[in-house]
Image (spheres, rainbow, N blue to C red):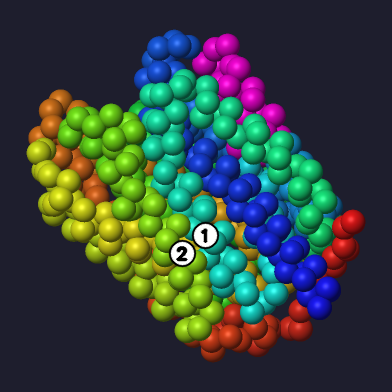
Amino acid sequence: MSQQNARAGGAAWALVITSVAGFMAALDNLVVTTALPSIREDLGGALHDLEWTVSAYTLTFAVLLMFGAALGDRFGRRRLFLVGLTVFTGASAAAAMAPGIDSLIAARAVQGVGAAIMMPLTLTLLTAAVPAERRGMAYGIWGAVNGLAVASGPLVGGSLTEHISWQWIFWLNVPLGLALLPLARLRLAESHGTGAPLDLPGTLLASGGLFGIVYGLVRGPVDGWTGAVVLTALFAGTALLTGFVLYSTRAKNPMLPMRLFRSRAFSGINAASLLMFLGMFGSIFLLSQYMQGVLGYSPTEAGLRMLPWTGMPMLVAPIAGILSDRIGGRPVVATGLFLQAAGLGYLASVITADASYAVQLPGLIISGIGMALFFAPASALVMASVLPKEQGIASGANNALREVGGALGIAVMSSIFAAQGGYESGQTFVDGLRPAVAVGAGVVALGGVAALLIPARRPGSTAGPLTAEPAPASEPVKATATH
């Protein structure tokens, strides 16, 4: 009995530590957006320059995620988690104390490095600590916290900026990080992956390819999609990623084994995640501006009115985790994606320059339920689609695709917005917003179709990875208890 209690306590601590760490990393994706005017007033620089306070974090985060996961598998997941958390916390303090715009951008880039090391290891550490029969609920809570962080970034950033100062959007991370460091050292068990040597050629090809594509997507709406730098970045990134795929099919110990994509489960859930974040990120980015710039709400008021969407994961995602344990993750994820698409489609149809909040509310609620149903089962499906020794790199790949999807969503939907409307008046903003959000709805619906391609799994089954083909027996994850 005491051993069972110790295990339950260890699982609870792992859930708290990984959820808070994930919250910190996910929050910083969009937390800066509503603070940009205040940052410009204090540090100077054109708005064009200040966009890099968002992009620098997204770039380093997306580019280094898979490498961070590989380092954890090789040198110890708890050890690298502590390294990433330390880097992230220190860079947050540096960003809060930045004397100028250039030093702020540099600190944000280092923040992204720390998040890239820390974030993919949260799921592998949680999986190792929680018994298989309880992972659905654990992933549900983890997903709820992360989903809330992604969606509430503009609210948190706007509220802190409006009522205290913009520096506090970064200071917020410091006490959280300092509290987590000793807890993680004492309460998390160490574990490793295969112990294979690091795949440096694969890392360079994947990192360079992701950098080129994300850089091109971020710069496209600003510099123009036909600009030489943008086209060069996109073509070079595509070429490097193609080289990464070809190399990884032949390498002895590749960073991301291409054979994983033979699994319909792994391919389906990663395609669904990419498309979900593409539609969701782009929609939140534009709808947050709509509520402030067109309807006249303050950053805090806009964030509060989006709570039926952004706050729903805290209520529904744990239930989604329990449902996925009982009926399998595929139907829950697919339902969530189709509901998210329906909510966005509804909003695209009712948004006007003077739309009442009551008219928008059904779309916000439906979108929130859909988002909540997606997050927890999606995490479980990623981890169940591979062998235990490959969960670190699978988590890194899934998070990298989510980040790339988010960058793509903002870039694509901003381009549609700019082509159909603009910032001249409330009506021109709505003229651009409606087709952009409609495209976002269509993209998320495609994600629902991708989720339906995932093979069905018997509820409660924990034997072997969720693949369409028989998989070799898994090797046990090496773990050592901490004292």
Residue 422: x %, y % from top left: 19, 31
Q: Quadrant of residue 123?
A: bottom right
- In percent of width and height, residue 89 lies at 67, 33
Please tell me whether residue 150 is drawn above or below residue 253 in the rendered image. above
Q: Is residue 407 left or right of residue 438?
A: right
| Residue at 83%, 74% in the rendered image | 3
- Left or right of 252, for residue 261: left
Crowding at label 2, few (<14), some or many (≥20) Cα neighbours within 10 Å? Answer: many
The structure residue drawn at horizontal position 56% and vertical position 52%, both measured from the top left corner, is 400
Task: Name the side, left or right, on which 38 lies relative to 342.
Answer: right
Q: Is residue 122 above or below residue 33?
A: below
Q: Which mark is residue 448?
A: none
Which residue is denoted by mark 2 in the rendering?
A: 317
Q: Is there any visible trace of residue 216 in the rendered image?
A: no
Which residue bears the numbered disc 1? 143
Tell me how far mark 1 sits from mark 2, CA to CA.
7 Å
Highlighted magenta segment, given as a residue range = 87-114
* Residue 242 position within the rendered picture, expressed as x and y whole percent measured from the top left: 56, 55
Q: For numbered disc 1, what is the local secondary structure?
A: helix
Q: Any magenta on residue 103?
A: yes
The N terminus is located in which quarter?
bottom right
User: Three-letter amino acid code at disc 1?
Assistant: Gly
- Residue located at (58% from left, 43% from top): 25
Callouts 1 and 2 close, C-beta under 8 Å: yes
Picture quadrant of residue 419: top left
Quadrant position of the C terminus in the picture: bottom right
Front residue of 338/278: it is 338
Q: In the rendered structure, does residue 77 fall within the stretch colored magenta?
A: no
- Where on the picture, by quarter, is residue 109? top right
